[in-house]
């Protein structure tokens, strides 16, 4: 978006042309969602904010902190605004799925202004509750939770497959369902990543054999039609991948974070794939996902996979959040953005191969 904004400054007509060109897909998606329902309740869609509404929003923000400008669009920029941070901590509740604001109600408060409604009405207003599971394996209803203190511990995408204990930093590892160990070479055999729709981190796809250009194009086209989230397996996705992975004899002895096989050898292409028939798209996708796998042991709180960097074919991103806006780092450390640079507890060094000598082929930490 930043690149588009810069181009729009040079070409005033670009903005209007872009908005006009997007109207057809916007109306199409809105129509699709308006025909969906959950538990008998139809989905509602809302139009995007107008220029006037956006400008009014900025005016309200500047009432809280007049040092905030239109260029302060990232969390890193907002972190530097003292009054804005004070307001966020005092009046706001920020969660993965929602953001709510509620005044404290104190007439003498210097952070938020006095309430304008009656005290009785104000006391009935509360922050939105987090999802909390009940004893019947269903989530407790909104009516029962509204007004009670909740935490984000039970958020569906919050579960951490690598639950770290801060006392001794021991790690509980959850095994993946792939028939082989994930590695940089097997990631390069696919050469395609899929981004999580929740955390937006890139997740690698692995194959024991190198995909043909035809298969890679078909795979990318299919990925463009789905919403992937961390921990998802492509088996039974849209009922197109129903094959069972072949069990591995050494599967129980292999860790998820394996960086073995990080050599630069490319395995030969499967020439049989070039002659695959296009008559049945479902069969071709099903067959494709019998060879292409994703590590389903990750969650949204997991780092970007180490083979992502050792493969050497993907753009560097922050290992913690997946952001492309990274700081310059030493060669022996993984990339970090400004927001995650303080997290030094898991800033591990790269493993590099020794060159030459009788120790050739061994790995060592530098």
Image (cartoon, rainbow, N blue to C red):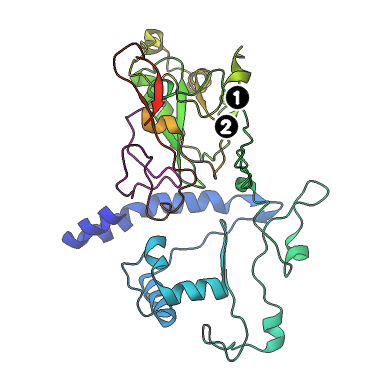
Q: Which mark is residue 296?
A: 2
As for residue 318 lying within the magenta part, the answer is yes
Q: Quadrant of residue 65?
A: bottom left
Kindly check if marks 1 and 2 are in contact, taking CB atoms under 8 A apart as contact. Answer: yes
Point out residue 154 in the picture as x, y percentages from the top left corner. Answer: 68, 51
Residue positioned most to the top = 272
The answer to whether residue 245 shows anywhere in this view is: no
Q: Is residue 53 above or below residue 359?
A: below
**In which quadrant is the C terminus drawn?**
top left
**In which quadrant is the N terminus drawn?**
bottom left
Q: Quadrant of residue 204?
A: top left
**86 displayed left or right of 174:** left
Q: Which of 338/187 is in front?
A: 338
Residue positioned most to the right = 135
Point out residue 96 in the picture as x, y percentages from the top left corner. Answer: 56, 56
**x 36%, y 43%: residue:** 335
Disc 1 target residue: 177
As for residue 68 lying within the magenta part, the answer is no
Give the CA separation, mark 1 to mark 2. 7 Å
Within-10-Å neighbours for mark 2: few <14, some 14–19, many 20+: some
């Amino acid at each position: 978006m930043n690149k588009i904004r810069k181009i729009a400054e040079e070409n005033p007509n670009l903005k209007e042309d872009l908005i006009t060109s997007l109207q057809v897909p916007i109306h199409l998606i809105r129509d699709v969602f308006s025909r969906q329902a959950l538990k008998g309740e139809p989905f509602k869609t809302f139009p995007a904010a107008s220029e006037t509404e956006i400008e009014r929003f900025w005016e309200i923000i500047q009432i809280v902190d007049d040092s905030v400008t239109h260029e302060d669009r990232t969390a890193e920029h907002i972190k530097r605004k003292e009054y804005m941070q004070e307001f966020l901590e005092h009046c706001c509740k920020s969660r993965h799925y929602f953001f709510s604001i509620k005044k404290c109600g104190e007439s003498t408060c210097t952070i938020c202004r006095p309430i304008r409604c009656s005290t009785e009405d104000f006391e009935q207003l509360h922050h939105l509750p987090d999802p909390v599971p009940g004893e019947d394996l269903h989530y407790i209803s909104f009516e029962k939770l509204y007004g009670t203190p909740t935490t984000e511990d039970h958020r569906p995408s919050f579960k951490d497959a690598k639950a770290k204990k801060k006392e001794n930093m021991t790690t509980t590892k959850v095994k993946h369902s792939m028939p082989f160990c994930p590695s940089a070479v097997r990631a390069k055999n696919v050469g395609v990543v899929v981004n999580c729709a929740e955390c937006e981190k890139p997740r690698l796809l692995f194959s024991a054999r190198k995909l043909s250009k035809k298969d890679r194009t078909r795979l990318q086209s299919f990925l463009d039609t789905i919403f992937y989230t961390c921990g998802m397996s492509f088996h039974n996705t849209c009922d197109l991948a129903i094959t069972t992975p072949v069990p591995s004899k050494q599967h129980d002895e292999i860790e998820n974070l394996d960086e073995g096989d990080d050599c630069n050898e490319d395995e030969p292409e499967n020439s049989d794939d070039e002659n695959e028939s296009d008559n049945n798209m479902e069969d071709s996708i099903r067959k494709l996902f019998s060879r292409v796998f994703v590590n389903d042991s990750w969650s949204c709180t997991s780092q970007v996979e180490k083979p992502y960097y050792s493969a050497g074919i993907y753009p560097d991103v922050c290992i913690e959040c997946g952001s492309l806006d990274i700081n310059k780092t030493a060669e022996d450390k993984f990339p970090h953005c400004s927001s995650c640079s303080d997290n030094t507890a898991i800033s591990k060094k790269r493993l590099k191969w020794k060159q030459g000598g009788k120790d050739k082929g061994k790995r060592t930490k530098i």
